[in-house]
Amino acid sequence: MLRLITSSLCVYCRRGPMIPTLHRARPCSSLTQKENQATVDALYSLSVDIRKVRKLKGWVLHQSPAYVSEAVTLLRGLGAEGSAIASILEQHPEAVLCSPEQMDAQRELWGSVCPNDRDLVGIIEKFPASFFTSACHHNNQRDNILFFQSLRLNKRIISKLMASAPQSFSRPVEHNQHMVHTLQEAYLSLGGQQDNMKIWMQKLLSQNPYVLLKSPEGLRENLLFLRDQGFTSAQLLQLLAKLRGFVTELSPESMRLTLDFSRETLGCDQAQLLEIVLKCPALLYYSVPVLSERLQVLLSAGVSLEQIAEVPTVLELTTQIVSYRIERLKAYGYDVRTGSLEALNGTKKDFEAGYGRLQLRRERPIFNPVAPLKTEE
């Protein structure tokens, strides 16, 4: 019977961008008791769902002045279609409160990191709040762009950072300089090569832009904890790369709970545990209740602890996915109790491809009269 240990760790709920919702009028606009009818009519003519705007951000409709036509002109100038413009203004109606001067300044700023207008429109469609932002952030945005350009990072990486983690560009550049320096220092101290550092940094930031918002001290503490567990410098560098910076979201206490639980449950010693973690770094950031639930599903299907230790990446799958895949494989004669758990792994596309091969193997004739006989069998 698996022992449940309570843990408050929840990585995924902290990943998303935390763009503050504006509940007050911007300095350049004033709040009126009645809705600004000109704004309502202009948005309605663009096929914007006014009911949705009223429900989620109705305060925008009470602002004056509003610059609906100017926002539309800018978006059309970038190549946005009517449906895209309506979607942008539904997601982020605050866009109409940006002054024309502010919009022009943002277009110029983003133009320095976006290859073309088409790419910029795509970014605005997905992250409108990152483009239509407060004018007070403009200087910080510019300084941060210059800083990342000084690192010779790819323009697409910089634009992705601005879009998905805009708060990291809205704050003073010193914060990002501190975190980047800490990451570079960790990379080199663990044996990383100076010549490869730019590529490593680009990959890390593109996979997890929110690493910039984390604490440099937290990163150092977590690496020291992992070193104390017995990981070598080379292994720590490997973990840092595989965890895509999510090691900054962990804490020594949460990792200790997870490692102790894994060691006790899988019945392995410390050296074996380290090998398991290197195969499946995700073990470090899954909470004990989550791991316990996933282990129980596998064990109830007849899978052994030895099989799980051999293919620990199966623990990255949710209980629903594991149960579904086990049943699918069972229908075509694959027994996870005796076969490799690798058959359960991978993305949906990977699994379906493997499942298709099993299906073909089952449907293939046992005897092919055209094929030569293999007498040695």
Image (tube, grey):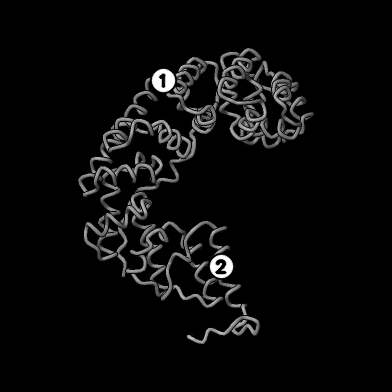
User: Closer to the camera, 313 or 302?
Assistant: 313
Which residue position holds label 2? 355
Q: Amino acid at mark 2?
A: Tyr
Can you give x and y, in whole percent of width and height, for residue 66 in the image?
A: 68, 18
Judged from the image, the secondary structure of the residue bearing numbered disc 2 is helix
Q: Is residue 92 above or below residue 305?
A: above
Can you give x and y, in whole percent of width and height, for residue 79 in the image?
A: 72, 27
Q: Amino acid at mark 1?
A: Val
Of mark 1 and mark 2, the one earlier in the sequence is 1
**Which quadrant, please, contains the N terminus?**
bottom left
User: Closer to the camera, 242 or 188?
Assistant: 188
User: Closer to the camera, 346 or 364?
Assistant: 364
Residue at point 27%, 38% (across, down): 190
Can you give x and y, in whole percent of width and height, for residue 231 in the image?
A: 24, 48
Residue at point 75%, 21% (across, down): 38
Which residue position holds label 1? 173
Judged from the image, the secondary structure of the residue bearing numbered disc 1 is helix
Residue at point 28%, 32% (across, down): 217
Can you give x and y, in whole percent of width and height, for residue 365 in the image?
A: 62, 81
Question: In front: mark 1 or mark 2?
Answer: 2
